[in-house]
Amino acid sequence: MGFGFGTLPQGTDLGPLSRRVFDTLAEHTSFPWPILQAQCNRVGADPENLRPQDLEGLVDHLAEAVGRFTSPRHREEVRVRLQALH
C-alpha cells in the first residue's frame, strides 16, 4: 500500500535505479523525493542518476529517514527492499 504522494518536481528525470529507489520510498512515506534528495546530498550522490555504489552508502540513511517520519516497521521494510536492489 503506497502513500499516494509520490510526485516528482517538474522536469525531474529519474534513471532506472533512482526510479526503483523512489518507488520504494513512495510506498512507505508521503514525501519520497525530499527524503531521496536530502540523503543523496548528504553523501554526494545524484538523486536522479543513482549508481549501485551510491545505493550502498544510502540504504541506512534512507531507511532511517523514512523511519524518523513513519515507524520502525517502515524503516526496516525500506532497508530490506533497498538492500535487495544492489
Image (cartoon, rainbow, N blue to C red):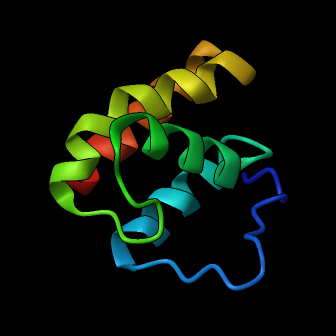
**Above or below, comparing residue 59 to residue 68 in the picture:** below
**Above or below, comparing residue 23 to residue 37 in the picture:** below
Count the numbered circles shown. 0
Instruction: Measuring from the top left, give residue 76's x and y in whole percent.
Output: 46, 24
Q: Nearer the viewer, residue 67 or 36?
A: 36
Instruction: Measuring from the top left, give residue 3's x and y in whole percent.
Output: 80, 50
* Residue 42 seen by the camera: yes
Identity of the residue drawn at 44% across and 34% down:
42
Instruction: Measuring from the top left, give residue 15's x and y in whole percent.
Output: 40, 79
Judge from the rendering whether residue 58 lies leftward or rightward of residue 31; answer left or right: left
Judge from the rendering whether residue 17 lies leftward or rightward of residue 3; answer left or right: left
* Residue 70 seen by the camera: no
Q: Quadrant of residue 6?
A: bottom right
Identity of the residue drawn at 46% across and 60% down:
47
| Quadrant location, the C terminus | bottom left
Q: Nearer the viewer, residue 21 or 74?
A: 21
Identity of the residue drawn at 47% across and 70% down:
48
Identity of the residue drawn at 24% across and 50% down:
54
**Above or below, comparing residue 17 to residue 74 in the picture:** below
Q: Nearer the viewer, residue 51 or 28?
A: 51
Judge from the rendering whether residue 62 lies leftward or rightward of residue 68; answer left or right: left
